[in-house]
Amino acid sequence: MSDNLKYVRKSLNSTILKHGKMSSADKDRLYQTVIHHKVSKKRFSIAPVLSIAAIACFTLFIGSFVYKQIENKENPQNDLALINNQEEEDDKTTSKNEEQKNNNSSNLASFLYELKVMLQENNMSSSPIEDSAKEVGDFAKDNAYRFASIQKEEAILKKLQEIGKLGESLQEVDTDEKRINIMSDLDYVANQLVVIAEAKGIIDERNNIIKNLEYENLETWLKSVKESIHAESFKPYGNREAYERNIGNGANLYAKHYAALEDDTAIKDQLKEIAEVTNKIKKEEGEEKRTELLNTLDLMIDQLLEDR
Amino acid sequence: MIVSEEEFHPKRREDILRELIDLYAESIKMLAFTYVKNWSAAEDITQDVFIKCYEKMESFRGDSTYKTWLYKITRNKCIDYLKSKWYRSFIPTDFMKEKMETMDQLSTEEQVINKLDDIELSEKVLALPTKYREIIILFYYEELKMKEIQTLTNLNIDTIKTRLRRGKQMLQKNVERGYGNE
């Protein structure tokens, strides 16, 4: 390659660079151009213009802001009144919206709870199934369509429509077997909707109440959870992760159950916080993070036991 | 070449400029082309180089030769040009046009073979990345000494040697690849 490069001058001159040759006339022209060139020609650049424009805009923005501030200081009372009125108006609108939302939400959650109670009572009832099925169907259809007409969440809307259709079917079918099947479907869809609605913050605490309890009271349950956290054995589970996540799952259901029954708001809030932590424990796959959450849960239980 | 103060009398400056243009304008234009690969840009750069030379002639202290000084100005102008946004959006076409025209002019078989070798070597040299190409051009084409290249580029000797070696290796690889394709 070094040998080849010795001829690079010849190669370039005879090919690519041969057009670079300059005649005496070219050189003279160049000389004249240089001699008569007074000021270095500068290419127009947009950058400084843009910089100046940006600085001007920024100065105007800051200037107007400062001017407004000064003006506000000069008329503080008027503005204060204006701001207060504005805030009051905003508060009113917000609280109205929230009230409306909570009202709709709690009604929907209550409807689901009442529907589930009706279905359970129907299972235990000794009266003819046809009458009670028609009553359940009527209740399900009317309320489901009513809530569907004001519902904006697509997932909830879809389930409400399903409930409405099942309610209609329950009124139309002619055999007990079909009625039982439809009520079973209705119970299943209602449970699904409870979970969906809960995820959207539409909760009726009564849905969290557990019928057949394993513990005598809140204290017994709390102590049992503490024992489980500190137990060395993880049997009957195959590994520590499954065991710990099950603690989270069970504790989550009981925390929500006791929170629904609790009258003392401070204790109720603590139980809700426990429900949040246990919900994270049941989902957490990372061992380190899970252990951290279990320690938090342990401390929260200590605090709750002490407060009670 | 050391220039005394009396040499900067306007008349004398013009004489020096004329002399410098006669001696170096052509090689500066060609050197510029090896950077920018466009004759129109190379001509503009040559003009700018001599304008700067004329304006700054009084500040030339004679630490290096006029040739090295002019080459240094050329290199800086070319690098500025290559960095400019305008160049980045522009695809140099002169080089390909050059190649086509040269091919058209070929007649005898021997000329064809020689020309093809020359074209290929030139093409490969100009296809190198700028930092390797400039060292190859300055060393092999301009036949400057290492010390002169150092003054011109402000690079240290080891870097220049490394770039020269690396440039040759890349050239070798490109040539082999060319034969492989044939």
Image: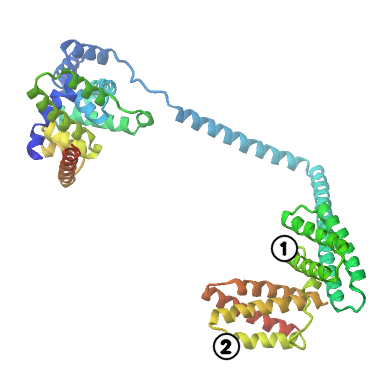
Q: Are marks 1 and 2 on the same chain?
A: yes
SS at circle 1:
helix
Residue A29, by quadrant, is: top left
Amino acid type, callout 1: Ile
Decide: few, some or many residues near mark 1? Use Cα within 10 Å; few <14, some 14-19, many ≥20. some
Amino acid type, callout 2: Lys
Residue A112, by quadrant, is: bottom right
A254 with respect to A23 (left or right): right
Residue placed most toward the observer, A220 or B179:
B179
Which residue is tagged 1? A196
SS at circle 2:
loop
Q: In the drawing, what numbered circle is on residue B122? A: none
Q: State the image coordinates of residue A206 (x, y, percent, origin top left).
A: 81, 73
Decide: few, some or many residues near mark 2? Use Cα within 10 Å; few <14, some 14-19, many ≥20. few
* Nearest to N terminus: mark 1 or mark 2: 1
Q: State the image coordinates of residue B98 (x, y, percent, origin top left).
A: 22, 22
A226 with respect to B169 (left or right): right
Image quadrant occupied by the N terminus of chain A: top left
Say if residue A254 shows up in the picture. Answer: yes
A3 with respect to A26 (left or right): left
Residue placed most toward the observer, A100 or B110:
B110
Q: Residue at x 9, y 23 (%)?
A: B109
Q: Which chain contains the residue that carries disc 1?
A: A
Q: State the image coordinates of residue B43 (x, y, percent, origin top left).
A: 26, 20
Residue A266, by quadrant, is: bottom right
Q: CA distance from mark 1 to mark 2?
A: 33 Å
Q: Classify B19 as above or below A132.
A: above
Q: In the drawing, what numbered circle is on residue A235? A: 2
Image quadrant occupied by the C terminus of chain A: bottom right
Q: Which chain contains the residue that carries disc 2?
A: A
- Contact, CB < 8 Å: mark 1 with mark 2? no
Say if residue B65 shows up in the picture. Answer: no
